[in-house]
Image (cartoon, rainbow, N blue to C red):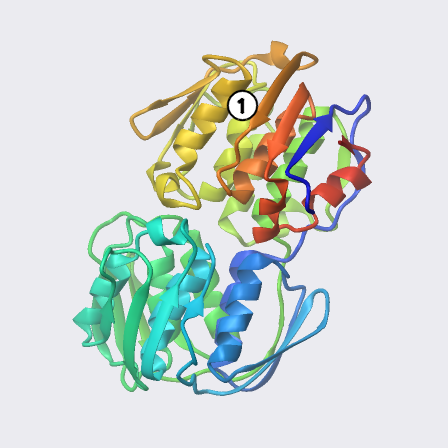
Amino acid sequence: MTSLALTLVPPAHPLIGRVQPPGSKSITNRALLLAGLAHGTSHLRGALKSDDTAYMARALRQMGVTVAEPDATSFVVTGDGTLRPPTGSLFLGNAGTATRFLTAAAALVAGPVVLDGDAHMRKRPIAPLLTALRSLGVDATSPTGCPPVTVHGTGHFPGGRIEIDAGLSSQYVSALLMAAACAAAPVDIVLTGTEIGAKGYVTLTTAAMQAFGAQVSQTGPGAWRITPSGYQATDYLIEPDASAATYLWAAEKLTGGAIDLGVPATAFTQPDARAYDFIAQFPCLPPVIDGAQMQDAIPTLAVLAAFNATPVRFTGIANLRVKECDRVAALATELARIRPGLAREDGDDLLVAADPGLAGQTLPTRIETYADHRIAMAFALAGLKIAGITILDPACVGKTYPGYWDALRALGVTLI
């Protein structure tokens, strides 16, 4: 995709067909790291090939792990349980999962590791993770509290107790959990508060760890114990991406279509799959939706809410301000660009006024995507009902769903 903009032509028919969503980004990046830390050769099937996973795979190669790609949905990863000092810094674009996971794993490298990203990544906070690592004696620093980060690893992950503030991101906890299985002694990870962003992703992490042979148990509502075990290579099947599925579920509802994803909504283990229950209620979404545990699905639900019968307030979404962009502000701004007053911020909440009468109108609108894949994919949904919706920088979807525009075309949507 090289176009600087794409304009959607609202289909005059329900969207009907079969679309296979890509593999889960969250699970693919977890599996890549665990396979890279394991002894032996792991076969990862159903994997996502996108910008984010490419950054993770390249970083692992820089640290001495063999990562082969025999086909479009597979990785074959061979390692000996050791990460080696990379030549040069690890450039990770705007891949938050890769950056945070590898920051903790870098403690296992016998030497310095610099982790950096693009201009957007350099605004994304990582200080709570660095504070937690330093509490164990790991030399991990960042001048700004965001990347670039420098970790002077000793080749070992210390055992002991880690307290972590995970209010900004569950990825901090996941990063520590995965590295802790390679520690020399048991590690206890304890939340310092009751809040944790999208805690369901921690469950994804522990499930993946156990599949690679780790011994991890939850010892309390916000506490985990990891027993030293290391990882063993395995064959691992990655489920489709639930966040990607939300766009297709919403497209089906908006057009009265029938889109077969090849897997029922109930089969997903990722937190964003809970958005299906809300999407199924359209055009009668509830007046308040708490997005705390399905954060990446909020852009989908917010655009859907624009066509709802009644207004919707989204709560529990403060963490969306530190994603690829400030998604609360982006959603409010771009919805209001379609029709003034359609959405606004209220503190950290998002209020979508809702206007079913938007459907069928021609409202030429150029949607700024802020280099954020989820803003681009979500606002494409508006273009299924409103003529004149143009998505700027459409190639940004390559971060997690490179085939998104092709999927819409396959369903009969015209893009110009």
Q: Position of residue 253 (x, y in %)?
A: 68, 28
Figure check: 140 above or below 171: below
- Snapshot quadrant of residue 130: bottom left
Residue displayed at 48% across by 73% down: 210
Specify whether 406 is left or right of 119: right
**Residue identifier under label 1:** 305
User: Residue type at mark 1?
Assistant: Ala
Placement of the C terminus among the 4 image quadrants: top right
Q: Residue at x 64, y 58 (%)?
A: 23
- Front one among 281 and 249: 249
Instruction: Report x, y in % for residue 359.
Output: 66, 15
Q: Is residue 349 above or below residue 223?
A: above
Could you tell me if residue 294 is visible in this image?
Answer: no
Residue at 19 percent across and 70 percent down: it is 134
Residue at position x 51%, y 28% in the image: 302
Residue 339, horizontal then vertical, whole percent = 53, 14
Q: Quadrant of residue 218?
A: bottom left
Label 1 neighbour load within 10 Å: few <14, some 14-19, many 20+: many
Q: Dot 1 lies on which element?
A: helix
Q: Position of residue 10 (x, y in %)?
A: 74, 23
